Image (tube, helix red, strand yellow):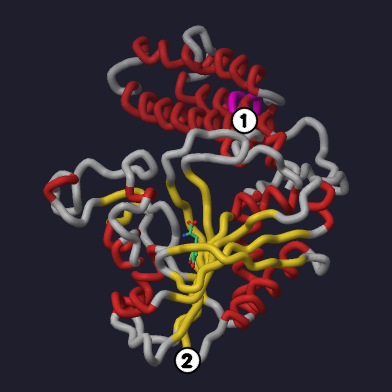
């Protein structure tokens, strides 16, 4: 038998060849066992170290250790090669196949209608303004010339917050917080912030203590409009409303103004609307908005001189318009988030 030290190199070469040749991970494990496992051939060689003389041992031990490290490195290298091969797809990829379409979300119908209304007003020089949904009585009522005995100020009609802005309770403060009942409060906020002229629209959510039914919901959406300049007339108001409704609902739209009362406008009107769809519903007219010429007291309240400035304002419900536009007969559908409903818009 050749000296132990002379057997190391040929055995190592054979082991290396065997590891490299392993075609898959199972075969590699097998080869590992055959050479460096407990009963492996290379392990057997190591076990013989003990039989060597004191003079031979150091050189042989060193050579065996070096060879062992080489084998372990080769084993790890081959293992990662085979793991990579195993992770590749078995079938070749066909890059000419059509892709899988991602289902795209859509804008809510109320958002679509709001954006259309905003787009129409932008064409004629209006900009969007915003205000808080948690409002105070001053901006929601007092500054809008709305008297203390107005029904909107009743707790039966409006959501009051238990504590005022300063932490005091409803009866201890004169400026109680509430959920805004209309977007008209933003008129006051904008006019207090900037001098005239003003040309704004205000889309936003409003709150009322209504029970939900087919035509009512405790929260809904409005769009407010305010135009202040010198020499503004009811004619401007009518022309603007007609322009926007024709853009939104088609050219067969007709508009009618009926005298009404709002405390922040004088004169005040309700706007009725009709088109072929309204006729199909068996009605002649549908009430769609409130409007009027800004009351001089409102101008006084925000520091505009009513002798110099004139203006008009209007407010209408967005749900109403969306229901008309799409033929929806129950307002609650907008808030249920049933995809079968939402998918249709
Ligand atoms: N704020 C009224 C409402 O919620 C709508 C309205 C009427 C707004 C007349 C106005 C207006 O700006 O001038 O019913």
- Calculate the distance from the C-alpha at mark 1 to the C-alpha at mark 2: 80 Å
Query: Residue placed farthest to the top in the image?
Result: 39
The residue identified by callout 1 is: 83
- For mark 2, give the secondary structure: loop
What residue lies at 36% left-to-right and 29% top-to-bottom?
Answer: 62
Residue 225 appears in the picture as rendered: no
Q: Residues within 10 Å of mark 2 (few under 14, many from 20)?
A: few
Q: What secondary structure is the stretch in magenta mostly built from?
A: helix
The residue identified by callout 2 is: 230
Q: Which of the two residues, 341 or 99, is positioned nearer the viewer here?
A: 341
What residue lies at 39% left-to-right and 25% top-to-bottom?
Answer: 60
Drawn side of residue 39 relative to residue 257, left or right:
left
Span of residues in magenta? 14-18
Residue 129 appears in the picture as rendered: yes
Residue 77 placement (x, y as % from top left): 56, 35
Residue 318 placement (x, y as % from top left): 59, 55
Q: Earlier in the sequence, mark 1 or mark 2?
A: 1
Q: Which of the two residues, 280 or 40, is positioned nearer the viewer here?
A: 280
What residue lies at 52% left-to-right and 47% top-to-bottom?
Answer: 220
What residue lies at 67% left-to-right and 52% top-to-bottom?
Answer: 322
Q: Nearer the viewer, mark 1 or mark 2?
A: 2
Quick check: is 44 in the magenta stretch?
A: no
Picture layout, residue 175 above or below residue 52: below
Q: Which of the two residues, 228 or 142, is positioned nearer the viewer here?
A: 142
- State whether label 1 is within 8 Å of ligand 1: no
Picture layout, residue 77 above or below residue 138: above
Picture layout, residue 54 above or below residue 194: above
Drawn side of residue 103 relative to residue 197, left or right:
right
Quick check: is 15 in the magenta stretch?
A: yes
């Amino acid at each position: 038998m050749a000296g132990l030290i002379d057997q190391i190199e040929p055995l190592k070469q054979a082991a290396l060849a065997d590891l490299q040749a392993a075609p898959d991970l199972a075969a590699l494990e097998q080869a590992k066992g055959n050479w460096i496992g407990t009963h492996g051939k290379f392990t057997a060689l190591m076990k013989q170290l003990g039989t060597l003389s004191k003079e031979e041992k150091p050189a042989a031990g060193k050579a065996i250790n070096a060879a062992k490290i080489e084998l372990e490195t080769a084993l790890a290298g081959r293992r990662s090669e085979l793991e990579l091969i195993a992770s590749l797809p078995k079938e070749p990829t066909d890059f000419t196949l059509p892709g899988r379409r991602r289902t795209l979300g859509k804008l809510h119908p109320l958002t679509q209608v709001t954006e259309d209304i905003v787009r129409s007003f932008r064409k004629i020089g209006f900009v969007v303004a915003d205000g808080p949904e948690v409002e105070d009585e001053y901006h929601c009522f007092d500054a809008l010339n709305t008297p203390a005995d107005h029904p909107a100020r009743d707790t039966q009609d409006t959501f009051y917050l238990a504590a005022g802005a300063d932490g005091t309770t409803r009866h201890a403060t004169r400026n109680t917080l509430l959920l805004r009942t209309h977007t008209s409060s933003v008129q006051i906020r904008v006019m207090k912030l900037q001098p005239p002229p003003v040309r704004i629209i205000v889309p936003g959510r409003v709150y009322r203590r209504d029970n939900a039914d087919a035509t009512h919901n405790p929260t809904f959406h409005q769009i407010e409009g305010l135009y202040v300049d010198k020499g503004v007339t009811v004619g401007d108001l009518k022309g603007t409303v007609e322009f926007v409704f024709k853009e939104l609902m088609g050219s067969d739209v007709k508009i009618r103004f009926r005298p009404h009362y709002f405390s922040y406008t004088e004169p005040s009107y309700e706007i009725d609307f009709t088109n072929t769809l309204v006729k199909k519903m068996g009605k002649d007219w549908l009430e769609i908005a409130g409007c009027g010429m800004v009351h001089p007291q409102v101008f006084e309240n925000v520091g505009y001189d009513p002798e110099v400035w004139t203006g008009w304002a209007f407010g209408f419900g967005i749900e109403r318009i969306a229901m008309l536009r799409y033929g929806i007969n129950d307002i609650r559908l907008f808030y249920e988030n049933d995809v079968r409903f939402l998918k249709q818009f």
